[in-house]
Image: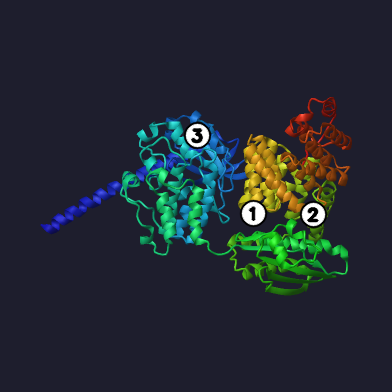
């Protein structure tokens, strides 16, 4: 009987299982049909703009497709909301909230390219990221190493701080919304959860579709509190950090409701009970960030990240200055080659994230001077100095290099290279690698990949490139023309030289700021396109393309290129500086101030970004910030002029800062010095006129402005809207200048 009963039970169980499998198969078939119909509807609706290649995935509320953007010739991730959800939401409020997210521009935020409604479908478009999500990383390895987890946390926190400062709360921070690309974190879907929540009101939770993901929900989200603020994102980030370090989220349960209940009232589990190697200070920080009451958490995500990193970063900062290599060749004209070698080594070691490197401008102030290493280290605020020499004879090359500890003058490392000229790139790479080893800096895989790729296979092309860089650094009209000619010779020899094309584009773009001709605009466009075509992974090419696009007034497209450059090289000064200039020109002064401040961080000794941010703060109506920034810029310029007393640009920008600080006497002296050094430069005349106008010296200002007009004054638009010239606007002489044809922009 028992056997028969068991047999009957087994038969019943098998029948039940077959029925379930059949139901699952039917549901799967329905899902496939539904997805196929959705893709066909979407493709039909957007056929003139996107070509859908394939489905990438499915989230809680949207399908994700890989698509080609037909207008911009790029691959994108096209996300379409579940049609039933879209129907219940309505498009107007959803798209209005999406538009807010589209205004976010940050190196660690995945930008929003496009959004809209088509044939009843709500969609939005983001870049297709070359990388993977944090979820995929955790599926590969969990838990993560402490250093990796904290680096990801820092970058996500930086993105959150930026968005929170602009009033945007993410509401769905989780590993699926954090992408890892080229060694950096990118937060995606910013504003999407907010859009769902705002567009649906209370209806969304009423239908059982919770906004957010239960494992990462803050207590206030779990209780449907409508007054969420930045501290909710902080809580969610802490859940992600806990998972990276423990291998699982802090709260788990049999259902979403059970997990949400633990967020609201459950005790926070000990991280160190799961992973003993985690420092106590890290556990304390995470526990505080997971506090049930928002007021008990950290004040910002950035503060949370800083407290987390404090115990894990006891090692002293590694800092270095690369002094100009001495030219020991028989030909004095070979200075450009030794200077170029120095610059290339600076660029190579500057790409190492764990190393702070003094900029070229600071290091080259010591060219040809006999100074004690301790003095140099103190002035440049570095712990180590690299010095060396270059001797070129025919096709032979001798390079010597010595790495010196500033504190005691001890030679940490030295080497002599006797090679063929063709080995110049290998020598540069070996020197950079030796410095990293000597300073105990570990190179990341992306850093190794970048250095493994030589810029050109032609030494002759490289020679012209170095000559061009020497002219470019003069940062004046004649220098840009001469530099462009050298770079064009380089690409004539090696048509595949992407860096040279990027440099050509920069010359055309900066010449356009001085003289807004169609030739300059066209040259910038063509050269920047070619640079990107040759090397889409070159940060310099993206920055050059962004600057060229801004010349044409295509500021939204330019911003995407600048963000791509920053993602590829977060230390690239010109990406931030050019981005700031483009934002300023477009009237987006908030972004301009942010980018100029980031440029100052990327290159602390640079005075140009420090001066430009003053003008951005003034346009934003922030006088206290403008005054503080002017004081900082004046100090940087004063230090720069001690090293480079004949830098005309530093003189007239510095005069502008001093005028704002009411240091009238010095402002007037610096302005007159600049004009005396470059009496035939209309850009100098324009900027000096601004200084005199600010000082209330109306006649002197008009004299300088008229001088600039006779020289071909740059700045038609600037003349009409530059507030520095407001004191002159009612004067008949100014009206006469305005009426005359003008060109360009002042820089």
Q: What element carries label 3?
A: strand
Residue 464's spot in the image, x, y percent?
82, 58
Q: In which quarter of the image is residue 84?
A: top left
The mark found on residue 122 in the picture is: 3
Residue 461 to residue 409: above or below: above
| Residue found farthest to the left | 1
Residue 630 to residue 459: above or below: above
Q: Distance between the residues labelled 3 and 1?
A: 37 Å
Residue 567's spot in the image, x, y percent?
61, 51
Crowd rating for badge 1 (residues with CA inside 10 Å; few <14, some 14–19, many 20+)? many
Q: Is mark 1 on a helix, strand or loop?
A: loop
Most foreground residue, 616 or 458: 616
- Quarter that holds the C terminus: top right
| Left or right: 261 as drawn, with respect to 8 | right
**Residue receiving disc 1:** 571
Residue 743 to residue 129: above or below: above
Q: Distance between the residues labelled 3 and 2?
A: 57 Å
**Residue receiving disc 2:** 644
**Any part of residue 1 in sight:** yes
Crowd rating for badge 2 (residues with CA inside 10 Å; few <14, some 14–19, many 20+)? some
Q: In which quarter of the image is residue 269?
A: bottom left
Q: Distance between the residues labelled 1 and 2?
A: 24 Å
Residue 543's spot in the image, x, y percent?
69, 48
């Amino acid at each position: 009987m028992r056997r028969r009963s068991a047999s009957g039970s087994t038969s019943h169980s098998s029948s039940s299982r077959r029925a379930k499998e059949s139901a699952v198969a039917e549901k799967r078939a329905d899902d496939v049909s539904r997805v196929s119909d959705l893709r066909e509807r979407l493709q039909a609706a957007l056929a003139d703009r996107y070509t859908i290649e394939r489905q990438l995935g499915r989230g809680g509320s949207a399908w994700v497709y890989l698509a080609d953007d037909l207008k911009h010739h790029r691959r994108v991730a096209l996300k379409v909301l579940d049609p039933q959800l879209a129907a219940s939401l309505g498009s107007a409020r959803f798209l209005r909230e999406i538009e807010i997210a589209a205004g976010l521009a940050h190196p660690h935020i995945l930008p929003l390219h496009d959004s809209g409604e088509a044939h009843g479908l709500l969609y939005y478009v983001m870049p297709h990221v070359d990388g993977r999500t944090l979820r995929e990383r955790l599926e590969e390895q969990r838990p993560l190493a402490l250093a990796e987890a904290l680096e990801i946390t820092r970058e996500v926190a930086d993105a959150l701080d930026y968005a929170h400062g602009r009033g945007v709360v993410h509401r769905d921070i989780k590993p699926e919304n954090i992408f890892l690309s080229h060694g950096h974190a990118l937060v995606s879907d910013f504003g999407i959860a907010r859009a769902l929540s705002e567009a649906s009101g209370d209806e969304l939770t009423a239908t059982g579709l919770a906004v957010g993901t239960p494992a990462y929900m803050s207590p206030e989200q779990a209780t449907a509190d409508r007054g969420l603020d930045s501290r909710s994102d902080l809580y969610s980030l802490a859940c992600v950090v806990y998972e990276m370090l423990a291998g699982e989220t802090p709260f788990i349960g049999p259902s979403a409701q059970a997990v949400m209940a633990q967020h609201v009232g459950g005790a926070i589990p000990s991280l160190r009970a799961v992973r003993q190697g985690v420092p106590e200070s890290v556990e304390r920080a995470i526990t505080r960030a997971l506090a049930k009451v928002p007021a008990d958490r950290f004040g910002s995500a950035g503060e949370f990240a800083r407290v987390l990193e404090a115990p894990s970063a006891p090692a002293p900062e590694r800092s270095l200055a690369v002094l100009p290599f001495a030219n020991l060749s028989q030909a004095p004209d070979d200075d450009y080659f030794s200077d170029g070698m120095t610059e290339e080594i600076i660029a190579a070691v500057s790409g190492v994230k764990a190393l702070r490197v003094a900029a070229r401008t600071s290091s080259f102030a010591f060219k040809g001077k006999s100074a004690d290493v301790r003095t140099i280290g103190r002035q440049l605020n570095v712990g180590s100095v690299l010095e060396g020499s270059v001797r070129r004879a025919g096709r032979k090359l001798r390079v010597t290099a010595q790495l010196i500890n500033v504190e005691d003058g001890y030679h940490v490392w030295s080497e002599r290279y006797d090679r063929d000229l063709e080995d110049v790139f290998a020598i540069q790479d070996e020197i950079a690698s030796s410095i990293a080893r000597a300073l105990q800096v570990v190179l990341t895989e992306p850093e190794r990949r970048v250095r493994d790729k030589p810029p050109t296979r032609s030494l002759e092309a490289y020679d012209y490139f170095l000559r061009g860089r020497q002219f470019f650094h003069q940062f004046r009209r004649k220098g840009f023309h001469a530099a462009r000619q050298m770079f064009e010779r380089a690409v004539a020899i090696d048509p595949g030289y992407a860096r040279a094309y990027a440099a050509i584009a920069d010359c055309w773009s900066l010449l356009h700021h001085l003289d807004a001709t169609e030739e300059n605009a066209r040259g910038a466009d063509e050269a920047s396109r070619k640079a990107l075509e040759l090397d889409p992974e070159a940060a310099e090419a993206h920055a050059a393309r962004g600057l060229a696009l801004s010349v044409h007034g295509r500021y939204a497209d330019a911003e995407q290129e600048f963000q791509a450059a920053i993602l590829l090289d977060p230390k690239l000064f010109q990406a931030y500086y050019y981005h700031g200039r483009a934002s300023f020109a477009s009237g987006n002064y908030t972004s301009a101030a942010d980018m100029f401040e980031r440029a100052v961080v990327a290159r602390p000794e640079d005075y140009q970004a420090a001066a430009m941010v003053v003008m951005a703060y003034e346009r934003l109506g922030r006088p206290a910030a403008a005054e503080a920034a002017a004081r900082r810029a004046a100090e940087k310029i004063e230090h720069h002029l001690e090293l480079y007393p004949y830098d005309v640009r530093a003189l007239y920008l510095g005069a502008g800062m001093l005028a704002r600080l009411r240091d009238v006497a010095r402002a007037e002296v610096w302005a007159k010095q600049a004009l005396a050094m470059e009496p035939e430069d209309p850009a100098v005349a324009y900027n000096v006129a601004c200084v005199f106008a600010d000082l209330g010296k109306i006649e002197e200002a008009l004299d300088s402005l008229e001088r600039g007009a006779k020289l071909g004054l740059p700045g038609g638009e600037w003349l009409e809207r530059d507030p520095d010239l407001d004191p002159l606007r009612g004067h008949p002489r100014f009206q006469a200048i305005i009426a005359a044809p003008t060109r360009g922009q002042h820089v």
